[in-house]
Amino acid sequence: MTTQLSEGEPLQAIPMPINHLGPSQKNQTNAENKPLSCAECCYTSASESSFKKHLQTHAGEKPFSCTECSYKSTRSKLLKSHMRIHTGEKPFSCPECGSTFTKSSSLKQHMWSHTGEKPISCAECGYATA
């Protein structure tokens, strides 16, 4: 099934009762509060604009292009983050050691080295890592 999204095309809301979701999907989507459901995956959203952006991932649309290389993205925020590779900008700084990062998620992961937190663990053997 191919998703096509055109300007002015109405969004199709597919009701998805929460009892039809698996336990992990219930935690991720909270479907009872999100009336728009993707027909190609388990994504749901209450926001039409967020839902429309999500549909672009299935349609293969990547309207945001890097001026320095061939990178293309579905979202302007991702392009902005990508551009830091070219500019060298690292706006996220560790308050403990001063290390800098291009993404907030990289700083968050780095902080685990200071706290000793190991939030990623194996359900089979219990091995944990940062």
Image: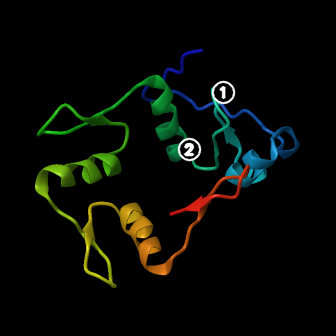
User: Which residue in the protein does label 1 denote?
Assistant: 39
Indicate whether 96 appears above or below 106. below
Q: Is residue 107 left or right of residue 129?
A: left
Indicate whether 27 appears above or below 70. below
Residue type, label 2: Glu
User: Which residue in the protein does label 2 denote?
Assistant: 48
**Which residue is pictured at 13% across the width and 50% down the height?**
86
**Which residue is pictured at 34% across the width and 31% down the height?**
62
Indicate whether 22 appears above or below 12. below
| Quarter of the N terminus within the rendering | top right
| Foreground pick, 125 / 1 | 125
Name, please, the residue furthest toward the bottom.
Answer: 96
**Which residue is pictured at 42% across the width and 28% down the height?**
7
Q: Is residue 15 left or right of residue 8?
A: right
Q: Is residue 110 left or right of residue 25?
A: left
Residue type, label 1: Ala
| Foreground pick, 75 / 97 | 97
Mark 1 residue crowding within 10 angstroms, few (<14) / some (14–19) / many (20+)? some
Tell me how many marks there are: 2
Residue 30, image x and y in percent? 73, 53
Residue 126, image x and y in percent? 70, 58
Q: Distance between the Cα atoms at labels 2 and 1? A: 15 Å
Residue 99, image x and y in percent? 26, 74
Residue 63, image x and y in percent? 30, 33
| Foreground pick, 81 / 107 | 107
Q: Which mark is residue 84?
A: none
State how the image is colored. Answer: rainbow
Callout in the foreground (2, 1): 1
Instruction: Identify the element where label 2 is drawn.
Output: helix
Q: Earlier in the sequence, mark 2 or mark 1?
A: 1
